[in-house]
Amino acid sequence: MVQAIADSLQIHYEDLGRGEPALLLLPAWCQSHAVYGSLPEKCAAYRRVLALDWRGTGQSDIPTEEYGTQELVEDALSVIEASSVQQVVPVSVSHGGRVAIELRRKLGERIPKLVLLDWLLLPPPPPYMDLVKALAEPDQWQHARDTLFGIWLEGVENPDVIEFVQQEMGSYSAEMWMRSGREIAAGYAKESDPLKALTALNPHVPVLHVYSQPPDLEYLSAQKSYAQDNPWFKVHKLKAKSHFPTFELPDEIATAIEKFMA
């Protein structure tokens, strides 16, 4: 891995492949770039890939001061600068999409497209928001986290998914999980659901949503209907069983991304 510097912290990232626009892989909260499994190598067959570890995760430095989404944006910007890449397409997991959207706002045409993986784009159901808010509470975060783990692993047999959730995500501290709950809730409070935030971008940027969960047809139909009226938005449904399809269907995801990049 190589490194960039953000707020005097070392931000580590993988740098694979050649060719632009490059892909910048952005994990969600309480994740290192390990969430992408073999996807970086798959995508690097087509173009340059940068896969970072946020501050406080993976091999990046652990900050001593409090931080939030805006500091993650600084991490991403530091990697873009250190890599000398001119055009980059963020590929974000779940709520890492908030960083992807902010990069588009800050860098404009240097961010020609966005790829979102398994993000709840429509208004979240109240039970989900209850869990998010509970994550931010010192006396509730662990129960909320364990409830999410149970939801994410229900019916899942893929050992890589199970290990990632239990070992990687399960290793993060109470402070990190409470931070995730606070920042995710703040994102919804500031900009409502992600699709509204994307719609508000002016000019619009081409967006591809690649996802597996939730599996219900209404969620897919709503996105397809939106895409018909908004040609800048595309959706690709995966037949994966988990919220972490990068471990289950990396080849299909890499192919879908490259088709979108063409």
Image (cartoon, helix red, strand yellow):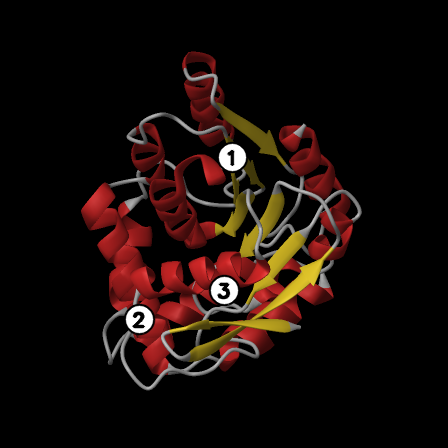
147 left or right of 65 in image: right
Instruction: Say what secondary structure mark 2 lies in.
Output: helix
Label number found at residue 45 = none
Q: Which residue is mark 2?
A: 179
Q: CA distance from mark 2 to mark 1?
A: 28 Å
Which residue appears at 35% of the width and 81% of the height?
Answer: 174
Residue drawn at x 57%, y 73% is 3
Above/below status of 147 relative to 261: below
Label 3: element kind: helix
User: Which residue of the protein is positioned furthest toward the top in this rendering?
Assistant: 229
Residue behind mark 3: 150
Report whether residue 242 is seen.
yes
Dot in front, 3 or 1:
1
Residue type indicated by callout 3: Gly
Q: Position of residue 45 (x, y in %)?
A: 80, 47
- Amino acid under disc 2: Arg
Is tag 2's residue or tag 1's residue first in the polypeptide sequence? 1
What residue is disc 1 on? 113
Give the CA distance from mark 2 to mark 3. Answer: 20 Å
Q: Is residue 235 left or right of residue 205?
A: right
Earlier residue among tags 3 and 1: 1
Which residue: 32% across, 31% down? 201
> Is the C-beta separation of discs 3 and 1 under 8 Å?
no
- Are there few (<14), some (14-19), or many (20+) residues within 10 Å of tag 1? many
Observer-side mark, 2 or 3, equals 2
Q: Amino acid at mark 1?
A: Lys
Q: Secondary structure at mark 1?
A: loop
Residue 246, position in %: x, y? 66, 52
179 lies left or right of 207: left
Most extreme residue toward the left, as rendered?
189
Kindly identify the residue that appears in the image at 37 percent across and 49 percent down: 98
